[in-house]
Amino acid sequence: MSTVPMAASQVAAIDLNQPGTYLHWSIFEISVANLVVIAVMVVIFGAALLLPFPHRNRTLPPAAELAPGGEPVPGAMGDDADAKMWTARTRRFAVRTLPPQKLLPDRQPAYVASWVYVFGVASLVTLGLAIVSGFALAVGGTDWWHTNPVGHFCNSMHLWSVELFMAFLVIHLWGKFWMAAWRGRRALTWITGVVAFGASIVECFTGYLSQQNFDSQWIATNGKDAFNATGVGAFFNVMNFGQMLLWHVVLVPIILIALVGAHVLLVRVRGVSHPLPAKRAGWRDRAGRTAAREADAGPWRGRTRRYDILKEGTIATAIALALVLIMAAVLSSPDVPSVSVQSWAKVAPADFLGTAAGELNGTALAASYGPPYNHGTAAVQQVGPVNWQTLAGVTQPVNAAQDFVITPLKKLAPFSPALAAALTTYTSAPAAQQQQWATAYGNAVTKVTFTGGTPVVPAANDGPVPVMMTNELTMARSGALDADLLAQRQFYGTDFTKPLLFIADGQYYANQAASMHLTGDQWGVMNETGSYPGQPWLWLYQLWYHVAPFSNSPDVDVWAVYLTGIATLLLLAVPFIPGLRDIPRYIPVHRLIWRDKDYGQATTGEQAPVGSATTGRSA
């Protein structure tokens, strides 16, 4: 079923799609619409020249009354009014919150002397490399890396910078957990870091979906079920590679960079968390707990060490860039070709014919999938009182019989009298008769043989369906069916929803994925084609597909989303949950990070001055 673009008159109060009016004189011809725009611009410019500017008399004092830096001499004129200006307030807040010595520090606490601290900088550096290599890919367009050696090398750099970024980010998160880094009013620092990690997963996910190779296809066709089951698939279509590419290069990066920026600023404002005491102090009264919290939140009063942040960042960049270049040159990047309807029909014609018959008689999954494609129920899932999938509705209409078989064949019918006659017979028959013919053919085609490439199906009461299916196979082998399924969508042709739903209903596609260890029972969400690393950071989501009773539930996709979401919320809320936030105290991994027992502070658990590293158990 093709969709028709909404006319502008349906969304505009005044329909400007009507023929325009044009004026001509001498060598010029211009539309009245353009003249109106120019006239409005002239009026605006004239108003800017003539209208008085508000508060134009509020001026600075003479130069003699200005301090050497250009600021008014205190008390000279209007200081109180100036101080209330938004700009002045913002400047004072920024300077007070982030003075230069915090933004670009040259000293840091002596305890920041562990390799675990390096991974924060490493994460930032590899994120920068991922962005730069993404820019390089964008120079050549969306497909040059499939066909051009330079493009493929840029893609390899992008892959390995992303792999390093995610690895370093996870290690950084591990380290901060075992440091209990949320102590000392640093909960927001922890939260922004966890949310940035979540945004990084979305960014990587949309990146994989944008590749338009086999891995991209498989992730899309399997990932759609979870998104559809939660209602998100109604607007986030993982099989629309154009949409995923825009999310990957525009929307998510803006959010991710904003989160990372906020996280880094919070680290600079609040500083790094102080070491936990070598020995866990016993129970404290309220005063003791308050003092401990104040100590964790206060400034560090122990020894410090030199810290050349720009030098460290430069060295980290050089090392990370060298690693990325070496891995890109030596290991390259995966690019298993995608499966098309054409390649499927050529390699597995019997499977293609059987699947097409299933689409025609409604037994294939796409024919009765449910929202957002149609009103079927075959893939509708629900956990809890609300069915989000049904509530989201049908937003990407798919009629499998019409879209995959009837409509494409109608394009071919004018060139084939036999096909035209068969289509007329089929479409003019009652629905029950159509169903009977298609079912009979579907049963018979399981024993199909091929003579000179032409399918020979045992005789059955299948009416005109054999002629239709023979032409469908011919059309698919020529590549015309791929083009038609994409042509049913307007404009750029990047929405592969229909061809992928059709391909995914066949067994050939699943067999290819199984041979590459990409299926669900093979922990396929985490795997990549070949021997390349995939997405190990998705282990928690994949886990639920292997744990009873969820693994045996028809609603497993919803369960996986809900349980992963709950675990993520728990991770976000670690600073506020007693017991969970105390795990680093009970399992003292932090002793391997903070090895020096003398940072110029008390180390026996007794009360130390505010700002010490050794007091402090947060409430």
Image: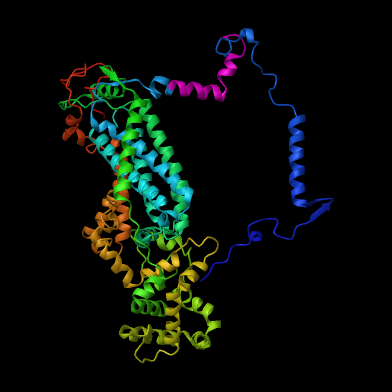
Whether the magenta-drawn stretch holds residue 85 is answered as yes
Q: Quadrant of residue 22?
A: bottom right
Left or right for 102, reference 92: left
Magenta region: which residues?
A: 73-96
Which residue is outermost to the top?
64
In percent of width and height, residue 433 lies at 44, 88
In percent of width and height, residue 293 lies at 28, 25
Left or right for 282, reference 148: left
The quarter of the image holding the C terminus is top left
| Residue 111 seen in this snapshot | yes
Identity of the residue drawn at 25% across and 19% down: 612
In percent of width and height, residue 359 lies at 41, 76
Identity of the residue drawn at 32% across and 42% down: 324
Q: Is residue 565 above or below residue 453?
A: above
In percent of width and height, residue 268 lies at 37, 27
Nearer the observer, 477 or 185: 477
Left or right for 503, reference 534: right
Q: In which quarter of the image is residue 187?
A: top left
Magenta: main secondary structure equals: helix
Q: Is residue 259 above or below residue 28?
A: above
Which residue is outermost to the front?
149
Q: Which colour scheme is used?
A: rainbow
Nearer the observer, 608 or 31: 31
Q: Is residue 96 above or below residue 420?
A: above
Identity of the residue drawn at 46% across and 84% down: 431
Whether the magenta-drawn stretch holds residue 469 is answered as no
Which residue is outermost to the right?
26
Nearer the observer, 150 or 495: 150
| Residue 432 seen in this snapshot | no
